[in-house]
Image: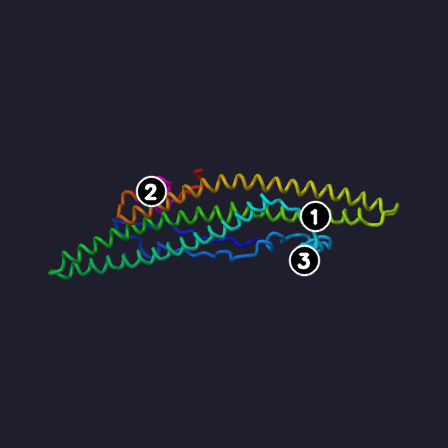
Amino acid sequence: MVPTCRLHKRRTPHRENGDCPPASVLKPYTSVCPAPYDSYTSQVTNLPLEPRYARQLMSEKLGHGSRTVDPELDCQIDILQDNKKKYENILRLAEMFSNHLFYMVHTQRQLVHVFADLSLKSLDLHKEFGKNADTQRLMAKNGETLFVAINSFIENVDTLVNKTIEDTLLTVKQYENARIEYDAYRTDLEELNHGIGGPHSLPKIAQSKLLFQTYKEKYEQMRNDVVIKLKFLEEHKVKVLRSQLALFHDAISAYSVGNQSQLEETLARFHIMKTPGKKATSWFEEH
């Protein structure tokens, strides 16, 4: 199975008296994302290495053998695999954004201390240093709130991509394996039917027909499972991404205009907790 992204969960930043949290509380995102992989190779992993299956795979690769195709379903699977790669890229970029935001907030927090200290020690520039300290404090506070929103977006999209979609692709792999098994027994039966007949070949043909029918039913069942999973996945994916993209947009928009109350309202609307010691409620737990 393709390795999944593992996002290190971190505690929500804690603030006292309007100040930003210490650097030890607010942590940047790190992850281990799956490397690109060949879709054909991934689909046939875990396939039993029986001679007939290996022969079927080899004949397909060399273009000598025939394979059962379902153009419409294969197209849906290709689109899903392509979209998964694009969603993984969104996750990678969102994590980079989160990390850059973390370091920016950390720098703003340091500026607050420097400006505040100089405001107390420089009588002639007390007002100017004080204004800059207040501005940086507000920006750091809004950045901290945006940081929480972005990380919630990352966690929920990661769950969609590396759990829900990955689960569907696992069923696709099982379907592809069943297809190869079915085609292998179909080829065996066709070779027996086109061979030189005789009384001694009748038991082999009867056994081959039985195996062919068994694996045909297995293939058709796996195909139906994939069709159903793809249907429900599409509905779920649209629901999740519609919500998470709205969160991303609203949080960024509020932050860009310095609207602190709108930022807080965005977190509340998506049930994202910031209280220290309490676990943030996942969007998936609410829906």
**Amino acid bearing label 3:** Leu
Q: Position of residue 243 (x, y in %)?
A: 41, 41
Q: Where is residue 223 in the image (x, y as percent from the top left)?
A: 62, 42
Q: Is residue 107 magenta?
A: no
Mark 3 burial class by Cα count in 10 Å: few <14, some 14-19, many 20+: few
**Amino acid bearing label 1:** Asp
**Amino acid bearing label 2:** Thr
Q: Which of marks 2 and 3 is in front?
A: 3
Tags 1 and 2 in contact by the CB under 8 Å rule? no
Q: Which of marks 1 and 2 is in front?
A: 1
Q: How far apart are marks 1 and 3 (CA)?
A: 15 Å
Residue at mark 3: 62
Disc assigned to residue 266: 2
Mark 2 burial class by Cα count in 10 Å: few <14, some 14-19, many 20+: many
Residue at mark 1: 183
Residue located at (69% from left, 48% from top): 181
Q: Is residue 224 above or below residue 30?
A: above
Magenta residue span:
263-279
The tag earlier along the polypeptide, 2 or 3, is 3
Disc assigned to residue 255: none
The tag earlier along the polypeptide, 1 or 2, is 1
Residue located at (46% from left, 49% from top): 158
The tag earlier along the polypeptide, 1 or 3, is 3
Q: Is mark 2 on a helix, strand or loop?
A: helix
Q: In this view, does 64 lie to the left or right of 120?
A: right
Q: Residue furthest right?
A: 199
